[in-house]
Amino acid sequence: MDIIALSGINIVYAVASLFLLAAGLSIIFGMMGVINLAHGEFLMLGGFAFVLSVNAGIDFWISMFVVAPLVVMFIGMVMERLIVRHLYGRTVETILATWGVSLFLIGVTSVTLGYQQLGVSAPLGSVEIGDYRVGGYTFFIIGLAVAVLAFLYAILRWSSFGLKARGTMQNASTAATLGVNVGYVYSATFGLGAAISGLAGAAFAPIAGVTPVSGLTYIGKAFITVIAGGPLPLIGTSTASLLLGFINSAVTAISTPVLGEIALLAAAILLLRLLPAGITGRFFRGGL
Amino acid sequence: MKTELTSPAFIAAFVIGGAIVFAAPLFLETYDLFNFTVFAIMAMLAISLNFVWGIGGILSLGQALFFGLGGYAYAITAINLGSGWGILAAIAVPCLFALIVGYVAFYGRISDVYFGVVSLTISLILYNFVNSTSDAFYTIGTARLGGYNGIPSVPPIQAPWAAQPLGFEAMYVLCALTALVFYLGVRLFVSAPFGRVIIAVRENDLRAELLGYDPRYHRLVVFAIGAAMSGLAGAYFAAWGAFIGPDTFSVSFAAQAIIWVLFGGLGTLIGPVVGALSVSWFTTWLGEVRLLDPNIALGLLFIISVLLVPNGMVPALRRLLERLRIVKERADT
């Protein structure tokens, strides 16, 4: 009984972490149809911003929920202004340019912060389930994923920014004709996606530590989740996280994490064979 | 096509290229020759990526993974069965892998952007997989995969009729000659009927399909040939350094290949070669002087190429020369 509960928690945790890692990327992708290849570096920078500010004596939760998202949001908006803005409508060039940014950010962080791994220990103790112990932080990650989903849904569904963003997403030129400042919407969406990535990077820093290349350990899963999810950022990413997170954790449980990753990739490729535009390319049309 | 094969320009290119390749060992130091060999190998990878991306129009962001697969296939097979079988495996394994991935992707009609990101993700996951194989359990025949340590003492290439494996000079000639053959082969391919269909598919696949050509099949063929070419380059690379490691699957190596092609001129024939040679020379030099972190330099070069020279250096230089010529003509008259 305990072991069933434990595996259940592991599966939910895998789904939640997949969603958190991919959420920021999916916002940017859903908005502009562009895969931000610097997404892993956004996560990494969020982790660094968090760890460095905790080490500087700032409160753990303030570092995670305020410092990391704001720092990465700022970097994301600068990048949007300097590079991505000049390439709107040219998806392939945008992807390539963000790849350049990714290499550049890895280089800059390894020169300034060095290659050693930084980290802080995870708070919240642990919970006993029969003979097993589960870290309280595991439940925090699950709760955070739910909160991020609710927050993004609320913003996109009910705020006036969300209305403009959805309009721009559906048809940018019509939105512009109706007086929406499309450039501003793109910039704000990019910033929102970056902030969520920064938060996710901070949330995983106590578990995995941070190095200049730690973004690379996350992006494979994040890319594949967003692509499998398709154009709708919230429904797409959450359904894809459910499916792929389940497969990933099930295979990991019976073999190794690397085989779990391979299973995740294989499942996603098979899924794309059936639904070439991702899950929401076929289902849930017109949702979020 | 007959006309292309017998055209004087083509024959001249072949003769001059061949002469340079064979003359180089006469006046180069061994160390330079060693470096030139790896430049020729990188040029092979650049030509194959350009073949798939620039000519076939397939956004193969993870093309370098076939280079790594070829290297590993060569190393494992050469250790077990000898280098001749190794070369065959290095061509066959990446080609087969490309056929499987390409079948799923092209026949599923995955969009360009999706395909690019999926191919990059395959590279990432292969990287993680190979890194995790340091356990002795991952042994094929007598070859241990070695995880992040890679496979050391990969045997050199040896012709089946020869008593000795290839030396430095012979290895250089082999690599340079193969690069030349790749270049001329792609040139011939573009002017052959099949190549023309490929270009039609790249430009407008719906129109090509309505004219009766199957874009899925044509893309698959280009992708598989390109993978085989990259695989052969990978085999040479493994034989050249007597080593193959998981870094060939890394994102930064994949990015380098993309930068070569982009910087030199995507879709032009000579551009990617120029890009591969100049950028690999630049990064080698940067490693020697330790002026700047290579990732920063490559990242900046990447961004600048995309934003400022989107067509690449070779077309940009060509346009500049053309403009200078016009200015000069006006001045003369």
Image (cartoon, rainbow, N blue to C red):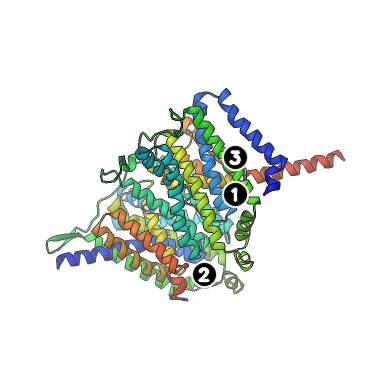
In depth, the one of B113 and A113 nearer the eye is B113
Residue occupying image coordinates x 27% and y 50%: A120
Residue B102 at x, y percent in the picture: 48, 58
In depth, the one of B283 and B120 nearer the eye is B120
Quarter of the picture holding the C terminus of chain B: top right
Residue B168 at x, y percent in the picture: 48, 28
- Labels 1 and 2 within one chain: no
* Label 3: chain letter: B
Q: With B117 as the anchor, is B187 left or right in this view?
A: right
**What amino acid is found at the position of numbered circle 1 in the picture?**
Leu
Task: State the residue position of label 1.
Answer: B266
Q: Nearer the viewer, mark 2 or mark 3?
A: 3
- Mark 3 and mark 1: Cα distance apart in space: 11 Å
Task: State the residue position of label 3.
Answer: B274
Specify which label sits upstream in the sequence, 3 or 1: 1
Q: Nearer the viewer, mark 1 or mark 2?
A: 1
- Mark 1 and mark 2: Cα distance apart in space: 31 Å
Residue A18 numbered tag: none
In depth, the one of B83 and A157 nearer the eye is B83
* Label 1: chain letter: B
**Would you say the residues marked 3 and 1 are in contact, meaning their CB atoms lie under 8 Å apart?**
no
Residue A169 numbered tag: 2
Callout 2 secondary element? helix
Residue sitting farthest toward the left: A131
The part of the image, by quadrant, that contains residue A202 is: bottom left
